[in-house]
């Protein structure tokens, strides 16, 4: 059987990773794209997500979908920049938690000696591997996949795969925390912190408070919004400080304007605290 025939089709929470790839594929086609992800289209197509998305019941649902797509584009650029800054500061160890169809190992320039770990469950990593083989994709750094559920003892799996907690790491949790219950988010952060040497960095995307309630209307069974479980804490900077991180946060609106993609709709009440977080371990 060929790779294509054997490929597991997206389901459950990891199907959301294919939806993210579809958004990145569309962005990559823009003349003024904030990033180019040449593999995104292949992931989307392999996962059955064509360029046109299924119709939505009303204008409000359409606007909500647009808002999600927008946030994916802005956060991708934010974290691309954060990773570049981390490399410039000398970090050579990268961990993508809930990596999904993230193709940064293939599309970004990495300094010599960079090791990049992609952590996700086995099904999306297998699907990804089959698409990467089909595309004959070649990683631009040392890429190591770690198949483990982030609610289990993932640090042991990561260390067994070669992660060295005694040297700095840059951690990325992009579009992930919203799919974990609050206790699991807390445990995840404690574990990240315990495996972060001084000088480590972290990029997180946190979901605005109230987003789960607002999107509940669209949350058809199996949709991404139907699987959302947690929102950002009241005081994200204080929360991170409590775990030993010096963090700064940015709103989507502020970053979008900085990237030349200003958001023109009026600010929402939940936009005061920023969901795009960058942190350094002291
Ligand atoms: C919305 S996708 C984001 C993927 C990727 N970070 C990106 O931005 O392209 C969420 C990812 O988190 C992963 N994920 C969610 N819960 C997980 C868990 N308990 N253990 C491991 N991975 C998980 C899913 O499999 C999926 O790939």
Image: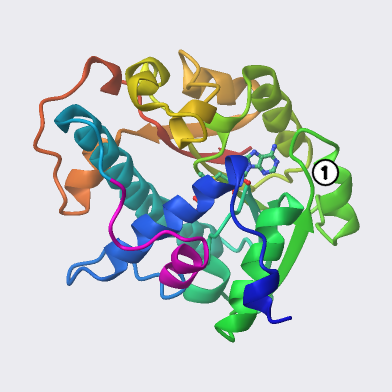
Q: Residue at x 56, y 39 (%)?
A: 176
Which residue is outermost to the bottom?
136
Q: Is residue 91 above or below residue 227?
A: below
Q: Is residue 56 above or below residue 80?
A: above
- Quarter of the image with the N terminus in it: bottom right
Q: Residue, x 89% and y 45% (percent of image)?
A: 156
**Is there any visible trace of residue 155 in the rendered image?**
yes
Indicate whether residue 53 is drawn in magenta. Answer: yes
Which span of residues is magenta-colored?
A: 40-54
The percent position of residue 240, horizontal first and vertical second, equals 57, 26
Is 72 part of what is drawn in magenta?
no
Ligand 1 closer than 8 Å to label 1 CB: no
> Left of 210 or right of it: where is 115?
right
Disc 1 marks which residue? Answer: 155
Left or right of residue 30, residue 125 in this image? right
Give the secondary structure at mark 1: helix
């Amino acid at each position: 059987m060929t790779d294509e025939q054997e490929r597991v089709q997206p389901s459950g929470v990891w199907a959301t990773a294919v939806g993210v790839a579809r958004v990145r594929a569309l962005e990559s086609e823009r003349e003024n794209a904030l990033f180019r992800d040449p593999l995104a289209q292949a992931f989307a197509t392999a996962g059955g997500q064509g360029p046109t998305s299924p119709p939505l019941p009303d204008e409000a649902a359409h606007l909500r979908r647009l808002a999600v797509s927008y946030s994916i584009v802005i956060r991708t650029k934010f974290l691309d920049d954060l990773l570049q800054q981390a490399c410039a500061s000398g970090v050579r160890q990268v961990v993508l938690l809930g990596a999904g169809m993230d193709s940064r190992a293939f599309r970004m320039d990495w300094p010599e000696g960079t090791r990049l770990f992609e952590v996700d469950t086995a099904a999306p990593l297998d699907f990804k591997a089959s698409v990467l083989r089909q595309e004959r994709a070649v990683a631009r750094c040392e890429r190591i996949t770690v198949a483990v559920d982030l609610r289990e003892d993932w640090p042991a799996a990561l260390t067994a795969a070669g992660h060295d907690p005694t040297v700095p790491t840059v951690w990325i949790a992009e579009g992930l925390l919203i799919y974990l219950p609050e206790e699991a988010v807390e445990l995840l952060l404690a574990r990240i912190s315990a495996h972060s040497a001084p000088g480590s960095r972290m990029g997180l995307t946190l979901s605005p408070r109230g987003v789960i309630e607002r999107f509940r209307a669209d949350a058809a069974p199996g949709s991404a919004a139907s699987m959302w479980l947690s929102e950002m804490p009241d005081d994200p900077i204080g929360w991170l400080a409590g775990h030993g991180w010096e963090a700064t946060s940015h709103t989507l609106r502020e970053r979008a304007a900085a990237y030349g993609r200003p958001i023109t709709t009026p600010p929402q009440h939940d936009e005061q605290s920023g969901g795009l977080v960058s942190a350094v371990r002291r």
